[in-house]
Image (cartoon, helix red, strand yellow):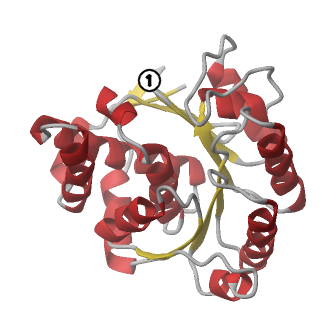
Amino acid sequence: MKKIKIEAAELLEKIREKKPVVHHLTNWVTIYDCAQIVKVMGGSPVMAHAKEEVAEMAKIASSLVLNIGTLTVDFVEAMKIAAISANEKGIPVILDVCGAGATRLRDEKCVELLHEVKIDIIKGNASEIARINGEEVRTKGVDAAHVSANLKEIARELAQIRKATVVVTGKEDIISDGINTYIVKNGTPKLTEIVGSGCMVASVIGAFAAVENDYALASASALVCFELAAECAAKKAKGPGSFKEGIFDCLANLDKLTINNKQKVERL
């Protein structure tokens, strides 16, 4: 692996300048956090779920984020309608396969989405992504379970099969489009102490993908910026509550010098 510098700072500045609309059909548990994380970057979040309006909303958006964390059958049908509209417009669709591997319904609905619409970025933790790739693993609710297989190979293989960028979050994040594979080593263990960190990552990826057509680069840049903000927040936090709030403040104030000097990125 080779250490590299990526233009994460430049992409964050593009978000701040262009203020892209990021349309979400997302997890009800973390919906506020997802909206807030996009807002503090300078983006414009919208959380429209009704089947009657999702297609129209997707038409005015710059990206679409789908998250099955609190799925129902009807909710997934609304996701399909929104994604078809996004596909027609040509904007990126991000799917957070939250909880894949925990139940049969989650597995089935992920497969339906991947088969029936074009998904540009598939994001999940190790066991979620492994399950989507057909591995025999079980996710602990929405928390990652141990995966013995080579995650870099799984990410690259799934990216090639699905013709998408795959993001595997964890102690080291893996991002692959089937050709280029990035490893992001920023972050803090405190991210495992709060609810919503993974959902927020999907939203941040949505904002970066809205301004950068290289979705592997966009995803790696999103993780760098989010995790640098988490590192900053961890230094000031007194506990999980102030840590989460601190992420918003630190991301809002993240500057080019910090991003360029502190990013930890490698490419295979």
Quadrant (top left/top right/bottom left/bottom right) for the C terminus: top right
Q: Quadrant of residue 89?
A: bottom right
Residue at figure coordinates x 23%, y 62% from the top left = 252
Q: Does residue 167 show up?
A: no
Residue 1 place in picture, x, y as percent: 48, 19
In the displayed structure, 48 sits above or below 114; it is below
**Label tally:** 1
Q: Dot 1: what SS? A: strand
In the displayed structure, 75 sits above or below 131; it is below
What residue would you read off at disc 1? 2
Q: Quadrant of residue 52?
A: bottom right
Foreground residue among 143 and 23 = 143
Residue 150 place in picture, x, y as percent: 66, 15
230 relative to 11 in the view: left or right:
left
Foreground residue among 193 and 188 = 193
Residue at figure coordinates x 18%, y 47% from the top left = 242
Residue 64 place in picture, x, y as percent: 62, 68
Residue at figure coordinates x 29%, y 67% from the top left = 40
Q: Amino acid at mark 1?
A: Lys
Residue at figure coordinates x 74%, y 57% from the top left = 119
Residue extending furthest toward the top: 148
127 relative to 173 in the view: left or right:
right
29 relative to 5 in the view: left or right:
right
In the displayed structure, 103 sits above or below 79; it is above
Residue 28 place in picture, x, y as percent: 54, 61
Q: Does residue 57 show up?
A: yes
Dot 1 crowding, Cα within 10 Å, few <14, some 14–19, many 20+: few
